[in-house]
Image: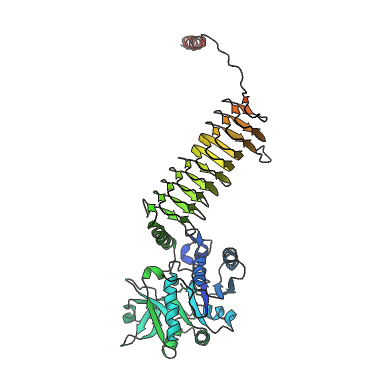
Amino acid sequence: MSRRPVKVKTACLILAAGKGTRMYSAQTKVLHTLLGVPMAAYAVERARDLGASPIVAVLGHQIDDVASMLEKRFGPGCVTVVNQKEQKGTGHAVRLGLKPLAGFGGMVVILYGDVPLLRTETLMALVKKAAQSGSLAMLTSVVPDPTGYGRMVRDGRGKIREVVEHKDATHEQRDIAEINAGIYAAPAEFLRLATSKLSVRNAQGEYYLTDIVARAASSIGVVSVDVPVEEVSGVNDREQLVAAEKILCRRIVDGHGKHATFRAPDDVVVEASVTIDPDAEIGRNVVLRGKTHVAAFARIDDGVILSDTVVGKGAHVLPYCVASQATIGENSKIGPFAHLRPGTELGPDVHVGNFVETKKTRLGRGSKANHLTYLGDTIVGEKVNVGAGTITCNYNGYEKRQTIIEDGAFIGSDTQLVAPVRVGKRAVVAAGATIIEDVRDGALAISRVPCKQIDGYADRLAERYHSQKKASR
Ligand code: UD1
Ligand code: CA
């Protein structure tokens, strides 16, 4: 599949001023996300794939929020924003959007902000057709239920004559199954002229962009590219949002699925920014987000949720682990039920077991923290054993403080390390210790109240309660 930008000079208009009433949301429709990416960003990504410049977004509802999202994602100046205060129709939106393109003489591609399934390859075919013919090129689709869409009206020889909106269509026209997808490519010159002549004499009292089709039919000509309806379906409500998200996800999974094993390709979430190397294996209900990378031969078991996390070669993440902004070294073994929080950096051959939480913590090669442990703001050397129930007390209510455990140290179970504190090389901390001072290399640190035993206690206790019972009867 060729992804080279189309050669003809191309600009892009993205129509996204509508509120999206059917979302029933305080947030404007195009800010709702699919796989972590706001809907409007999909259109900008397609425009960038085309190499389009400038990219103009016609915005209205929550314009400041949408504009700042676009700037954050694509950088300042990448998208030129035009304010359509009142949504007077698609034709009006394009007329406004053409204003910043005053001197532009190339091809203009018109996209919607709510059609996230559109593929770059399809747009390239559209632009190519427009460029080769010098005509207006539009995407069309034959659908089982055309209700609501503009219908493609063709003459006896199959040439496109016009588009008639559903509300303006006659009974016969409503039987037409071929619909206008609303995505066009045309010479800027033609669009400027055609949109300057639109009227609102129609059933909705709006400036219909679709009126340019009849104008093109009698001037530069109209050509169409037929596409599967799935690709051009707009997102209008939350049901369509999640359905589109599922399709997008399946495309991503299928892309990785040739070289990595997905045990349940329909029951995972993989964002587009995730990378997965050959021979990785992904289990059921796994969620991989952001800049997560799964290296070769790594195994991600069922129910694991990773955000911006790097999993090293051959590492094994057991079921139900959650990690965010963490690095897992080669051949390490994590979980089940481990929680790796931001700033966790695990070296190779590290074991982090069940109910272990780490934050801003490094573990060196071969170190282990296998059970019920919290390590925060901690640097752990190589071949350290952190016993069950070890807790770093890193927070005094005001600031976070650091714990350092050096190579080969052994931390006995149920230890509290009160930071700031250092445990030296090969030092041994006895089980149940509360460490409030640095432990010297190779030393034993033990902090225990001596154990006292009182013989016969159990019997005396039983007797006391028995006699009380008798007395109360
Ligand atoms: C439009 C087409 C219809 C086509 C359908 C495909 C027109 C008149 N009709 O209908 O032929 O079958 O798309 O989905 O063009 N927008 C603005 N400003 C406005 C109006 C709309 O920015 O003043 C934006 C919307 O936010 C949306 C897009 O344009 O992203 C399409 O608008 P919408 O109202 O959904 O068009 P339809 O009536 O569905
Ligand atoms: Ca629509």
The answer to which image quadrant residue 251 occupies is: bottom left
Relative to the observer, which residue lies in front, 442 or 430?
A: 442
- Figure coloring: rainbow
Residue 335 % position (x, y): 47, 40
| In the depicted structure, whether residue 369 falls above or below residue 471 | below
Residue at position x 32%, y 85% in the image = 158
| In the depicted structure, whether residue 382 falls above or below residue 290 | above
> What is the total number of numbered labels drawn onto the structure image?
0
- Relative to 18, 150 lies left or right: left
Residue 332 % position (x, y): 48, 42
- Relative to 448, 260 lies left or right: left
Relative to the observer, which residue lies in front, 93 or 357?
A: 357
Question: Does the rendering let one see residue 435?
Answer: yes
The answer to which image quadrant residue 163 occupies is: bottom left
Residue 161 % position (x, y): 38, 86
Relative to the observer, which residue lies in front, 325 or 438?
A: 438
> Dividing the image into 4 quarters, which one contains the N terminus?
bottom left
Task: Indicate which quadrant contains ligand 2.
Answer: bottom left
| In the depicted structure, whether residue 467 falls above or below residue 159 | above
Question: Does the rendering let one see residue 18?
Answer: no
Relative to the observer, which residue lies in front, 369 or 164?
A: 369
| In the depicted structure, whether residue 179 falls above or below residue 427 | below
Residue 430 % position (x, y): 58, 25
